Every structure is written in structure tokens, then in C-alpha cells.
Amino acid sequence: MDFNMKKLASDAGIFFTRAVQFTEEKFGQAEKTELDAHFENLLARADSTKNWTEKILRQTEVLLQPNPSARVEEFLYEKLDRKVPSRVTNGELLAQYMADAASELGPTTPYGKTLIKVAEAEKQLGAAERDFIHTASISFLTPLRNFLEGDWKTISERRLLQNRRLDLDACKARLKKAKAAEAKATCEGDTVPDFQETRPRNYILSASASALWNDEVDKAEQELRVAQTEFDRQAEVTRLLLEGISSTHVNHLRCLHEFVKSQTTYYAQCYRHMLDLQKQLGSSQGAIFPGTFVGTTEPASPPLSSTSPTTAAATMPVVPSVASLAPPGEASLCLEEVAPPASGTRKARVLYDYEAADSSELALLADELITVYSLPGMDPDWLIGERGNKKGKVPVTYLELLS
């Protein structure tokens, strides 16, 4: 291989000069050219953007793929420029287990039929999760990763500006030493120049020391002008790149909106699938357990929504209360006046302690036995419970109905 020894020696000399200047600055033995406050703010803003983008990117990857081994595998496939193999989601895997269990335990039995229904819902949840991961990766992760691996590498070429600044400050120090030596030679007469104070030069030693130092000053001033021009040019380029961070923020803001949109769609799909499943299980529960009061077709509490109050009020399921079930013309229903039906009362064992929310509810203690019954049009999530002369609403989920 053909080496250019002159260029190699020149590069080594430049590197040595920068190293000496950097070391002297660290020890406070050399002056340093300071950047203006606006430039420093741009640098700090760029560094902050880079650091937080890395953290958001890594945590979003954890959110989409909690398995660290799977993340490492996907990273290796990406670096090898190979297609990442398709991987089933946890929901799809659970659906497969449930379907296999139903097939072995009996698909016509009540348990087998329920397993099949839940398996289908879990499969739909897994498919929705897969779509969410794919959409979020394209609309959110990819732009962030492109910024860190592309734009930031261009912006972070501040090493060039740092090198130009070190060259500039080294030239300033060299000129300062040359002027000091020239003034000293002028005062003391002709002396042999001390080349260790600046750098070796091919001078003619027969010339006077004052003339030699004057020549050294001229050369140092010329090099300083060149270094100043190079530094100013690189500073302007770096400034323009740093000011581009604002457009990066706008792009990341757009990506963030897309991420929220895809996440909203995903959770809405999950809610719809689970609501359909709950309706299926509620409609089939009466046939499986005739005479019980268990089952619901609507969730007890509505999902969180980012829609307006008016829209939310129109779409959220409403849980009826006992008072709202009163006949027309009556403001409320007094439980003390409600007589138990002639048939339909049952004994129930309390599973957990329950603290009554208001006077219309009956407080419960675990393992106690109470009498329960339902009223026409009453919310299936609630029953009327009696204990001695006390009466009130009780939640079905806290009870085990006895035969």
C-alpha cells in the first residue's frame, strides 16, 4: 500500500497541536474561544432532543415488545438486513391453547363451548395487537430511529467545529508568543531566536533575531486569518443544522399524533371484542345455569374516552339504579315497601366483604348467608338481599347462589 508520508506527518502534527491545545485548556493554561449564548442554547437543545428521543424510542419498543429476547432478535435481523420472522402474539397463543383444550375436553360441553368463544375473542385481540404494533412501528418508531441514525449523525458533526476551534486557539496562542518574543528581541537586540516557543522553521540564522521574529509574526497572523475563516464557516454550517431541530420537533409531533391515533384504535377494538364476548357469555349463561340471576349484557362501568362529554353521554352504557326503575309517577322506590316475590327467592353465600355505598345497598360480610331475589326490569348486576329485617341492593359478583 502506498503511504503518503508527508500527509501522514502533517496529520500527526495537526493532531499533536490540537491535543496540546485541548490539554492546556483543561488545565487553564490556554485561552478558549467561547461560543455565543444562542449557539450554546442550540447545542443544549439538540443534545436534549437526542437524549429524550433515545429514551422514548427504547421505552416504546418495550411497550410494543415486552420480551427482551425478542427485541434482541429483531435488532439482529434488522442489522443483518433480513426480514424479521412472523411471531404470534400472546393473545393468539392463548387462543390456540383454549381451542385445543376445548377440542380435547369436548367442544359440545358448556365449558368447551365457552372456551371456543373466548378463544375466538382472544384471537381477535391478538390480531388487533399485531396491527397496532405494525402501525406504531411504521408511524412512530421508524421516524425516531431515522432521526437518530440519520439526521442526528449530520447534526452531531460538532467534532469538526471543535477541531476548527482548537486550530483557531492554537494559532492565537502561537501569534501571542511570537509577538512577545519579537518585543523581547527588539528590546534586547539581536539574539538567536528560541524556536521552542513557537515551532521549528527553516530560517536563515544569519538574519537578525528581530527580523526573524517579525517574519514569524507575519506567518502566524496569516495562519490565524485562515483558521478564523475556517472556524466561522464551520460555525455557520453547524448553526444551520442545529436550528433544524425545530423542524424535527414538528415531525416528531406529527408522529406522536399518529401513535396516539393507532393506540386509540387498538384499545377501541379490544373493548368492542370484549363487549361482544361478554354479551355472548351473558346470553348463554341463562341456558347453562337456569334460574340464576347472573349475567350482564353491558359493562358495569363505561370505558375511558377522549370524546366530548356530549358524545360520551350518547355512547356510554348507562347502569340503571333501583330508583330509576320506579313506576311512572313515583320519584323513588322504597326498599322497605318492596315485598319479596312468592317464588324466585334463593339463598346465597357472600364471597367477599362489601361496604354499602349508600342507604339503598346492603353491607355484606364474607361467608354469611342471605336471601336474594330479583325485581322485574332490575339491572342483572344487582339483586335485592335480605338479612333479618334489613334489606338492600347487593352486587351479584359478591355472591355464590345456592340451590
Image: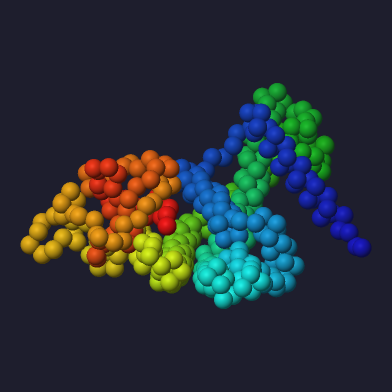
Residue 262, how many percent across, how many down? Answer: 46, 68
Residue 263: image location, x then y, percent: 46, 64
Residue at image x 78%, y 45%?
13
Query: Residue lying farthest bottom?
Result: 108
User: Which residue is depicted at the point 7% across and 62% down?
Assistant: 329
Q: How is the image coloured?
A: rainbow
Which sits in the foreground, 231 or 82? 82
Query: As drawn, which residue projects farthest toward the right?
Result: 1
Indicate the quadrant where residue 276 lies: bottom left
Q: Is residue 132 visible?
A: yes
Quadrant in which the C terminus appears:
bottom left
- Residue at image position (32%, 53%) is 372
Q: Nearer the viewer, residue 246 or 333?
A: 333
Residue at image position (25%, 48%) is 392
Q: Is residue 206 above or below residue 58?
A: above
Residue 268 visible in the displayed image: no
The residue positioned farthest toward the front in the image shown: 342
Determine the image quadrant of residue 322: bottom left
For residue 153, which quarter of the picture? bottom right
Residue 340 in picture, x, y percent from top left: 24, 56
Q: Nearer the viewer, residue 141 or 171?
A: 141
Q: Which quarter of the rendering shows the N terminus?
A: bottom right
